[in-house]
Image: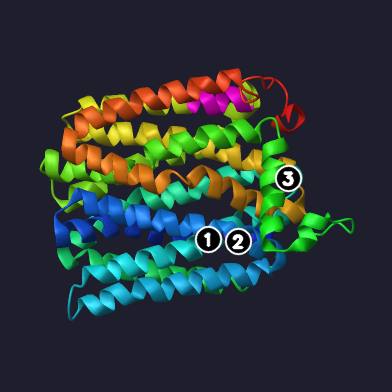
Amino acid sequence: MWGNPDYRIFLGVQTLSALGDSFSYVAIPLLVLHSTGSVVQMGLVTALTGVASILTGLFAGVIVDRADRRRLLMLADWARCLLFALIPLVWIFAEPIWLVYAVVPAAGVFMMLFRVAYVTVVPAIVGPGQITRANGHLFGTYAAASAGGPALAGFVASVFGPAAALGIDSATFACSAIGILFMKISSARRDSARSEAERAGVRDEFLAGVRFLWAHPVLRPLTVLLSLLTFLTYGLTDLVIFLVREYLGHPDSTVGFVLSAGTLGSCLASFAVARVRERLGFGVSWIGAFVLCGTAVLGLGLSHSVLVVGALAAVMLFCTSIAGTCSMSLRQEVTPGHLLGRVTAAFWTTHSALGPLGAGAVTAAAAGFGVTATCLGIGVSVVCIALTGMLTGIGRSHPHRPATRDA
């Protein structure tokens, strides 16, 4: 893979973009919190972004499977560059919170388009046997860039304001778009015997991805369980920020350091995921990761130390990175290339559908019942849902065979 120039360029520009993403990761919740002082409104912005992404997912797969994927990636990057540049420019003269409610969900539309195209690009630039390792590298460099990013974003936000941090994210999207211009991405070959559903229009093309998911013995229960897990975990970042900022009384810079500590878990996961999946199999890796994640959320609710919160955030991101990399690699391995965009969009749209509702529910629960009770409820629920996977095709996958053979 390291001799592949397209892979090197893609890895490099996505690392830079990840550094920018980490600024938004911190800056957007802080911007809302500074302007409104409300954890509920933090959750509302997160929820609206999720709704925009879900609605985009209804047609994102169709667009990705039809369009030139390199141009689509560039379009998504330039659009987010311009959108996020609006906030710091307007904030020079005024601080209209409505602009955040308009810009951030709009950016979520292009984020979904980029994410679906991103998944289809990886198999197009590396060999079939390199997909899990390539995903591990991409997650690892993303985590490495994100490790220092939140701390730096917290510093920028505390000195210059959260809007300035969003300006940095805007610049990284421009750099990513320019880098992608120099890549060559092979187009997925369409089967000459496409089904009538694929010819019939957007609705039936989207349903082609849904039907593939539903017919697959591992992807079907994976999608259902992830829908429930997403409902519970979608608002966890807002919860951690609220815990550190309001309950423990620390400044914005400390919020950045805590989130940076969390990304170290993702970095460690990138080195471990290929070996974990090879030794334990897909089922044990995925279920075990979420059981450990739920346990960490339980500990988060009982913690009164910012150091412990940072360590538990690292454990949570380690687990979700292991599970996410395994899940994405499995979809890339078992899905035909001409369907991969639609299957990815259907998967994300379906399992993310409850996310916005969950973000609102979690932040409302934190405001009404407190962070401790909310974390305890989420932690127990995550563990129970993950263990349910043992009764499905996920848990019955053989630990000593590749996941594609189990599928």
Mark 2 surroundings: few (<14), some (14-19) or many (≥20) residues within 10 A: many
User: Is 71 situated left or right of 94 in this image?
Assistant: right
Which residues fall within the magenta stretch?
Answer: 282-289
Q: Which residue corresponds to the image point at 69% horizontal and 70% vertical from the top-left?
A: 68
Residue 10 vs 128, above or below: the answer is: below
Q: Which residue is mark 2?
A: 59
Farthest-out residue, bottom: 93
Residue furthest left as drawn:
249
Q: Is residue 178 visible?
A: yes
User: Do the CB atoms of the residues marked 2 and 1 lie less than 8 Å apart?
Assistant: yes
Q: Earlier in the sequence, mark 2 or mark 3?
A: 2
Q: 190 or 138: nearer the eye? A: 190
Residue 64, image quadrant: bottom right
| Image height of 366 relative to 127, above or below | above
Q: Which residue is mark 1?
A: 56
**Distance between mark 2 and mark 1 Cα atoms:** 6 Å
Residue at numbered disc 3 = 335
Report if residue 261 lies within the magenta region: no
